[in-house]
């Protein structure tokens, strides 16, 4: 908490510097450079706050990241934009890897396009970590090789040490123990030489599982904790190490001490993910001691409520399995069997979810360009300089493609039924949306016809009537025409064909103007700066999604402050927040409004992140992979 306070003080200071620089016009270059440097310092502080907050407060981490993105956009500086995009990717990497990859990829493209390569090694390292999470070890190794070479040439020692640690993890996953230890030793040697205490601590704890002597393993972990404790922000890693040390203990009382130390840290800093695992391990140790009551209290009163609130399927499977052991300890074998079945069911569902997430992430990664999948320009240069011939490169590419095909075949085999269900869901969503659009089209047409007939009848009546004052006749005729025009515009907006024939930007501008005119909510909108022309389907569904968000705000949160931001940066991004009453996302999951938004995103291949709870407002982060209409026309079908 002390470190967070210090970061907050630094942030306040840098923001004050920014304000003072912005208010004073200084033509001198030195002053402008000073203001830009202060702005970059602010972005670094926000980046650090995101790293600290993402483990215990996702909403706060996302707010910090968006604040950094807004500052970078206002600055107009390329390097600031690259840093802010990378920060957005970090904010999402714990719970929405699709969005995380999208921001990392945008940062990479911007760095390559402008030649601003200062943070390029960090970005490629982050993308390599996503490939590691997707079990694409071949591509992860290729990217890490690039990170190692570029970091060494640019003397980015911290990134280089982190790359060695991740390289060791990848080698370990491939079963290459000797090469894995070599990478960890390289990280340790470099960290000691360059005084990188965090990376040194990580390398030491990575080596501990390979020690056959438990005392030596414990010594490595103690050294790791010592180095990690030297700087704030490493509490999550320290708690993880303490749990691992407890796992090494053969005597339950010894294990309890380490688990309790980890639990204290997790409780203080709000690390819910580790808290559940540690409670489970503590319960198992109490069971070994024969203290069934303490074990039950930990699972039933502490861990299970958190796991149920977080709907973490893997944690629930683990906790129900332990609770089955508790029932056995009490001699309640029938109840134990019931909890064991629950554990098995949750584990199967967790495996299916993990497989689906991995397949989705791998699919997103495979859609990237060849340079993003294989190697960067720096790698190509290094390979050419090392004298690799064309035949060897071709062999490596064919081998990579074979492994990739093998992995895709395995994923396809595991996900056949899931893909079939997704296809049926897509068709169902299309039918439902088409039916809704057709109904709106019919209603709009009938509304237009009825309004036309009524207005003509009224106009005839007015023309045939005697007025003592001709101005009254003209005023009444004008009001009839105004009503007819309003109804005609409304009927046109209900017609999907009319919407699709217009650009997204003018449609949204008109929609925002209408919302503001009604005055039900306080709307702060931002579109652009200039959206490209999209296909008719993207225009229709994107407009309907924004319309649904704002309609929900007027219906459920009148008088609230609403922010709606739409921009294009390789994808179409829709960011929405309000300070309304919020709602329980679990209970409202099947509501008509949320279903309508998700069905339209399914058709567009988009993703969404919804954050809301009673009393805390609502936040949407929507990403639509939309290409400009000219690009789509040029591509082969």
Image (cartoon, helix red, strand yellow):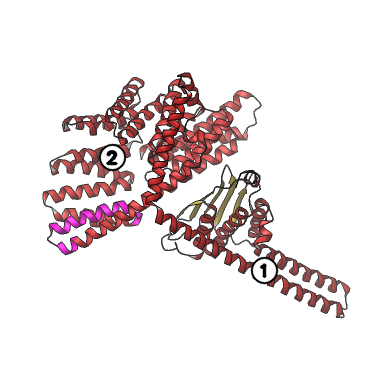
Q: Is residue 534 visible?
A: yes
The secondary element bearing badge 1 is classed as helix
Crowding near the residue tagged with mark 1, few <14, some 14–19, many ≥20 C-alpha atoms within 10 Å: many
According to the image, label 1 marks what residue? 444
Give the numbered dot on residue 240. Answer: 2
In the picture, measured across the screen, residue 544 lies left or right of residue 118, that is: right
The span shown in magenta is 309-336
Whole-number angstrom distance, CA of label 1 to CA of label 2: 60 Å
Q: Residue at x 36, y 30 (%)?
A: 167
Picture coordinates of residue 299 (x, y %)? 23, 54
Q: Does the stretch in magenta take in 329?
A: yes
In the rendered image, the vertical position of residue 12 relative to residue 516, given as above or below: above
Looking at the magenta stretch, what is its main secondary structure? helix
Picture coordinates of residue 487 (x, y %)? 71, 68
For the N terminus, give its image quadrant.
top left
Question: Considering depth in this image, is 314 or 53 the residue closer to the camera?
Answer: 314
Q: Residue furthest front?
A: 391
> Which quadrant of the view contains residue 520?
bottom right
């Amino acid at each position: 908490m002390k470190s967070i306070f210090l970061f907050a003080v630094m942030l306040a200071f840098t923001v004050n510097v920014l304000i003072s620089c912005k208010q004073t016009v200084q033509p001198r270059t030195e002053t402008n450079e000073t203001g830009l440097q202060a702005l970059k310092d602010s972005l670094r502080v926000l980046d650090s706050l995101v790293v600290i907050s993402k483990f215990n407060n996702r909403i706060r981490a996302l707010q910090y990241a968006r604040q950094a993105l807004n500052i970078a956009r206002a600055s107009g500086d390329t390097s600031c934009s690259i840093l802010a995009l990378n920060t957005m990717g970090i904010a999402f990497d714990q719970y929405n890897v699709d969005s995380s990859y999208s921001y990392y990829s945008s940062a990479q493209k911007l760095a390559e396009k402008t030649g601003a390569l200062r943070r390029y090694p960090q970005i490629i390292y982050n993308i390599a970590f996503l490939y590691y999470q997707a079990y694409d070890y071949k591509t992860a190794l290729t990217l890490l090789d690039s990170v190692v070479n570029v970091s060494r040439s640019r003397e980015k020692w911290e990134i280089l040490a982190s790359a060695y640690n991740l390289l060791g993890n990848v080698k370990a996953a491939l079963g290459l123990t000797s090469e894995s230890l070599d990478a960890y030793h390289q990280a340790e040697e470099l960290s000691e030489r360059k005084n990188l205490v965090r990376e040194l601590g990580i390398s030491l704890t990575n080596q501990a599982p390979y020690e056959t002597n438990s005392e030596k393993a414990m010594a490595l972990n103690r050294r790791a904790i010592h180095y990690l404790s030297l700087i704030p922000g490493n509490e999550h890693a320290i708690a993880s190490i303490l749990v691992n040390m407890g796992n090494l203990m053969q005597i339950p009382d010894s294990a309890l001490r380490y688990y309790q130390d980890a639990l204290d840290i997790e409780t203080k800093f709000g690390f819910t993910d580790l808290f559940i695992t540690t409670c489970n391990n503590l319960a198992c140790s109490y069971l070994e001691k024969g203290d069934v009551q303490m074990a039950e209290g930990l699972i039933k009163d502490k861990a299970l409520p958190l796991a149920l609130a977080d709907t973490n399927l893997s944690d629930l499977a683990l906790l129900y399995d332990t609770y089955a052991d508790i029932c056995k300890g009490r001699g309640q074998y029938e109840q134990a069997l019931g909890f064991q079945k629950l554990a098995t069911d949750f584990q199967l569902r967790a495996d299916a979810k993990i497989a689906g997430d991995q397949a989705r992430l791998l699919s997103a990664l495979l859609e990237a360009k060849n340079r993003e999948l294989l190697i960067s320009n720096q790698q190509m240069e290094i390979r050419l300089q090392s004298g690799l011939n064309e035949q060897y490169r071709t062999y490596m590419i064919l081998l990579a493609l074979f492994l990739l095909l093998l992995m895709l075949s395995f994923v396809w085999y595991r996900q056949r039924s899931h893909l079939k269900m997704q296809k049926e869901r897509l068709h169902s969503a299309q039918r439902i949306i088409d039916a809704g659009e057709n109904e709106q089209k019919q209603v709009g047409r009938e509304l237009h016809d009825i309004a036309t007939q009524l207005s003509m009848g009224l106009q005839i009546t007015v023309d045939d009537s005697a007025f003592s004052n001709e101005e009254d006749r003209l005023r009444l005729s004008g009001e009839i025409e105004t009503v007819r025009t309003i109804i005609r515009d409304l009927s046109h907006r209900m017609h999907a064909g009319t919407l699709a024939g217009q650009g997204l930007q003018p449609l949204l501008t008109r929609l925002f103007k209408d919302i503001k005119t009604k005055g039900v909510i306080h709307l702060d909108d931002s579109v652009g700066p200039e959206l490209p022309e999209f296909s008719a389907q993207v225009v229709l569904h994107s407009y309907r999604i924004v319309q649904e968000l704002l309609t929900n705000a007027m219906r459920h949160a009148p008088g609230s402050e609403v922010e709606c931001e739409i921009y294009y940066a390789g994808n179409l991004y829709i960011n929405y927040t309000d300070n309304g009453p919020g709602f329980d996302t679990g209970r409202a999951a099947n509501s008509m409004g949320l279903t309508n938004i998700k069905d339209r995103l399914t058709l567009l291949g988009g993703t969404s992140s919804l954050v809301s709870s009673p009393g805390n407002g609502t936040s949407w982060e929507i990403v639509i992979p939309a290409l400009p209409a000219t690009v789509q026309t040029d591509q082969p079908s």
